[in-house]
């Protein structure tokens, strides 16, 4: 297939995403605001994001206001080794550590809708190409691992549970 970009914003898709798994040339996938478009009762939009994890040429993946039956980012996301932009505005509650294996990631945005809590995982120290991280309206309380990512240009952790600036931030000069 020659299709390289697929944007499906403001639609009412649901079910499985198996129809995407053969789009191997896809380098950009945007699924935005698929649930509650018309203030309908919240139902999970998709069974799983695993079919997307087979799209090895993806460079940009954007989920906005999507809901999944499984609330965990799957281990299979590690296969998206070319990914450099990841936007998650979905209802995930766990699996944040899997993102730390996306070594080419440059921009990470985790917005409202996601419900991550606790410390950013140690695996984030692998994200040495990361330039921007924006985690908004979650319950992150420890961001010290970010001090090991010396190429960071933007850290935005607004509306979280941060209470101190870690000493590891001295490395970010």
Image: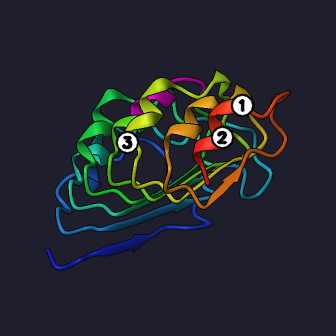
Q: How is the image coloured?
A: rainbow
Place of residue 107 in the rendered image (x, y in percent of width and height, measured from the top left): 51, 59
Q: Which residue is mark 2?
A: 169
Q: Are marks 1 and 2 in contact (CB under 8 Å)?
A: yes
Place of residue 16 in the rendered image (x, y in percent of width and height, measured from the top left): 37, 42
40 magenta-colored: no
Compared to residue 98, the image places residue 133 above or below, namely below
Q: Which residue is mark 1?
A: 166
Image quadrant where residue 71 sits: top right
Compared to residue 27, the image places residue 101 above or below, namely above
> At x 16% / y 57%, what residue is drawn?
22
Q: Is residue 47 visible?
A: no
Q: Mark 1 and mark 3: span between their CA atoms?
A: 41 Å
Q: Mark 3 and mark 2: span between their CA atoms?
A: 42 Å
Q: Which residue is mark 3?
A: 16
Q: Mark 1 and mark 2: span between their CA atoms?
A: 6 Å
> At x 69% / y 31%, what residue is drawn?
167
Secondary element under disc 3, as helix, strand or loop, is loop
> At x 40% / y 55%, what residue is drawn?
129
Number of other residues with Cα within 10 Å of mark 2, as a class: few under 14, some 14 to 19, many 20 or more: some
- Span of residues in magenta: 93-98
Q: Is residue 123 visible?
A: yes
Q: Quarter holding the N terminus?
A: bottom left
């Amino acid at each position: 297939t020659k299709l390289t970009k697929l944007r499906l914003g403001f639609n009412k898709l649901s079910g499985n995403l198996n129809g995407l798994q053969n789009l191997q040339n896809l380098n950009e996938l945007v699924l935005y605001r698929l649930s509650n478009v018309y203030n309908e009762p919240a139902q999970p939009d998709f069974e799983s994001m695993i079919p997307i994890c087979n799209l090895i040429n993806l460079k940009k993946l954007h989920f906005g206001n999507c809901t999944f039956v499984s609330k965990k980012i799957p281990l299979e996301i590690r296969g998206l080794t070319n990914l450099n932009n990841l936007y998650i505005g979905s209802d995930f509650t766990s699996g944040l550590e899997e993102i730390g294996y996306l070594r080419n990631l440059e921009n990470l945005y985790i917005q409202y809708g996601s419900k991550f809590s606790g410390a950013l995982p140690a695996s984030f120290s692998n994200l040495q190409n990361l330039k921007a991280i924006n985690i908004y309206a979650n319950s992150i309380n420890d961001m010290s691992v970010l001090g090991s990512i010396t190429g960071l240009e933007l850290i935005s952790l607004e509306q979280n549970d941060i209470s101190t600036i870690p000493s590891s931030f001295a490395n970010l000069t």
